[in-house]
Image: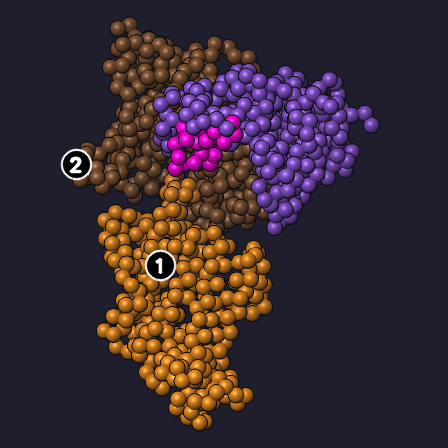
Chain colours: A brown, B orange, C purple
Amino acid sequence: MEALVVAKGLKKYFPVRRTISEVVLMKSRLYVRAVDGVSLEIGFGETLALVGESGSGKTTTGRMLIGLEKPTEGSILFEGIELTKLSKKALRKIRPRIQMIFQDPYASLDPRVKVGDQVAQPLIVHGLCNADEARERALEILERVGLTPSTEIYERYPHQLSGGQRQRVVIARAMITRPRFVVADEPVSMIDVSLRASILELLKEFKRERNLSTLFITHDLAVAKLVADRVAVMYLGKIVEEGAVEEVIYNPLHPYTKALISSVPTIGIRVLEKLKIVGEIPNPINIPPGCRFHTRCPFAMDKCKSYEAPWIYVSERHGVSCWLYSAE
Amino acid sequence: MALSLSTPILAFIRSFPQPAKSMLILGLAIVVSVMLMAILAPYIAPHDPTSRVYVELQPPSWKYLMGTNHVGMDVFSRVIWGSRVVLFVVVVSATISMAFGVPLGLASGYYGGPVDKALSIVMDSIYAFPSLILAIAVAAVLGPSPLNAAISIAIVYVPTYYRMVRGETLKVKQMPFIEALIVLGCSDATILRSVFRNIIQTVLVVFSLSVADAILTEAALSFLGLSVTWPTPDWGLDLRSGQPYLLNGYWWIAMCPGLMIVALSLGFALIGEALSDYFSIATKV
Amino acid sequence: MSNALLEVINLKVYFYTLSGVVRAVDDVSLRVLPGEWISIVGESGSGKSTLAYAIAKIVPPPGKIVGGKVGFMNRDLMEFDEEAMRSIRGRHIGFVFQDPLTSLDPLRTVGDQLAEVIQVHLGVSREEAVREAGDLLELVGIPRDRLNYYPHQLSGGQRQRVVIAISIALRPELLIADEPTTALDVIIQDQIMDLLKEVQRKGASIMLITHDVALAAETANRIAVMYAGEIVEHGNTHSIINAPLHPYTVGLVDSVPDLWSKKSVKSIPGFPPDLRNPPPGCRFHPRCRQALGICTNESPPMTAIEHDRYLACWLYLKR
């Protein structure tokens, strides 16, 4: 199956500002290696969850796929078009088909514009229809995301809505141009716990109805399990494990994945034994040599300290980057 | 019409928390009465401000509320007519400063890059210059006239608007709702409009506070004879003409226009402070 | 004379804002036994943090404790003045806040801050205090040589460990942790929870304030569920999680995605109420599928339905 989105070897290095004394002493510039060689594919109608801790580079990866950040290296193919080489104008033409849902529903709406007008705006910006029609379609989609009566909600300003309602507005705005691909960056982490499920359900409905492809960025494996088909686990700028969501959760291979799964609190009964690891994620300016997880890994061997582990497929679609699974 | 407009304005004032509300009301009272004074000058001034109406150096009396000056003109009428010059200079200069400072700050903050760096350096160097000396220098080159005074004051305050607008733009630009517009494929013009909508309260605050300051600068310029020429009534100019007589006990000639300068400046400053409290904007003008 | 360490009775904390009186904590009663871990679970705006602040009498203005009693070690804290409270805080009630940066002085080393607490309260020599500070750091899992570090040189997880070290320095009987891991990643959260369990093992009672039902369930002996300023259900962890009775608790447990349970997930309809103008009767009734006639006008009293199980819901009360 040909994938809708194919990213290969994505890298994003942010230069670190030097102090004046460092410039004078001609110290070389340091880089934050936020994303350090990420490849992924998202099929038609598929949801890929990108899971990791803060500082893992998952948000930067999403921002590159959406064109908010230019990759330092690598390629992104969307419907066979190379996004990284597009001009600003050509990229703007593709925008209706690639959308984003942001984390903070309080900050992702313009506080001074009626929410209805914000939902209708993409249609008008891209000249897809006239103002009256845009209003009609905005009302329709507000209704669809459960904001009723839509004629009343249309006239409200963001501060007159609750967090959950605003996130529905954000989803409506992203969906109104019928995109093929959506990047959702922690869309429920700022929503009240008792309302999260309905937002996730809404995203799943759009996925089913429209064969929507989604990159779902989250730190919460339980949420990933609920919405995703596949999951990719990121650590310090790299994907360390990827596979079908049930398989990764019930049969994790990489020690980091195991530790991550162990640490998620649960009200159910754990299937796997807990794996505790020590320390915290290192600074992405000084990424450890070899396997970048070896400093915290309880199974680290000598070769982990100097050689990066190859990508190994243990089954057709379950891959891991770890020496423990290498025949070498 | 006046009634339909006054309702939202009153509601806006009522929504201020204390003590900002008292500050705003006092500030507005001062500024509005000076404006009325300027508009209605021909009707409320009891005498011709530029001709000798009585014996010189007479102390305040019922007929001459603020006394007469050294050539026998009515100080009260001169104070009323003088408000016109101050307001003209201040409004014209603020308009010019905003016309340059706001768009430059917006563009600089939004686009960044080398143009932003160059502009920032130019603006910072103007800003670093003592404002009064700069205004005097420009006014001296242009020659004495109210319009030239307005231009020289305008130059002094362009960096103030520029810096505040640029700073706010940098802040707003990073807000997710602006990024959302980029993702939606909006043009730069649309995005800039949205940024502007969200920094307009800052412009309002900077306007009030810098006008408060500009009133003092204007007074200084006319005190030095770089604005209107005698005998046109003007607060700064009258301050100067009364100054030699101050030591001999004829306090009213300088004191009356001087107090008006202080009051008007205070009025704008109070409005500015109240607005910045309301919008919670840090005022590092 | 009761055997409880902390006994909160009919506590009321109101915030007097410009737009009205917010009844953040309304008639809350709660009991904490020595050495037990109690988790207060609730969504944002449920009043759970305010309850914690009120226990230590540090409610920020415009908030005010307007009624009720806080009994601690058999003394009524409501009768204590500010100076007397200061000898209680830190010494007997320790606090860990959500953001460790707000509780650390950025300009002083962590060793300095730790040693000062020990020196001032225990009246020991400087050398002894520094030695003790080093011991404490090691206890919370930070190498002794970090005594000379400034807060900004530590990671978020390490800072929270330092805050915990400071708050347990005087061996308080009660440690209140207000969302201590919300700003941290799950692996670090797990480590911090282990550390708190260690603190409990040493004899302290822990009160964990959290919005995370699963986190509360994994650690607590007992759970109290708060909704709109009131405790709606209160009992041992097992029964609250596995056999919740109050419709809100049922909805809350059902709404959380869980890695290891097969149950489906569904949201509670509607939104939490505005506490300036809470609904009459049971505050949950507008969102409750099983609401009865009485729920709309009469507030259900907190009732013991079995040993150590309290509930405020008309569905289970005989009228």
Q: Quadrant of residue C108?
A: top left
**Residue lying furthest top in this view?**
A327
Residue C35: x and y, percent?
Answer: 61, 18
Residue bearing mark 2: A26
User: Viewed as shown, does residue C183 lie left or right of C143?
Assistant: right
Q: For marks 1 and 2, give the one nearer the viewer.
A: 2
Q: Quadrant of residue C210?
A: top right
User: Viewed as shown, does residue C15 lie left or right of A257?
Assistant: right
Q: Nearer the viewer, residue B212 or C277?
A: B212
Amino acid at the residue labelled 2: Met
Find out whether residue C100 is within the magenta segment: yes
**Alpha carbons under labels 1 and 2: distance apart:** 37 Å
Label 2 lies in what chain?
Answer: A
> What is the quadrant of the C terminus of chain A in the image?
top left
Stretch of the chain drawn in magenta: C98-122
Residue A320: x and y, percent?
Answer: 34, 14
Tell me the element at label 1. Answer: helix
Amino acid at the residue labelled 1: Tyr
Residue bearing mark 1: B161
Q: Residue at x 70, y 38 (%)?
A: C67
Q: Residue at x 54, y 88 (%)?
A: B62
Say if residue A301 shows up in the picture. yes
Residue C6: x and y, percent?
Answer: 65, 26
Q: Quadrant of residue C297?
A: top right
Residue A304 is marked as: none
Q: Are marks 1 and 2 in contact (CB under 8 Å)?
A: no
The total of numbered circles placed on residues is 2
Mark 1 vs mark 2: tell me if same chain: no
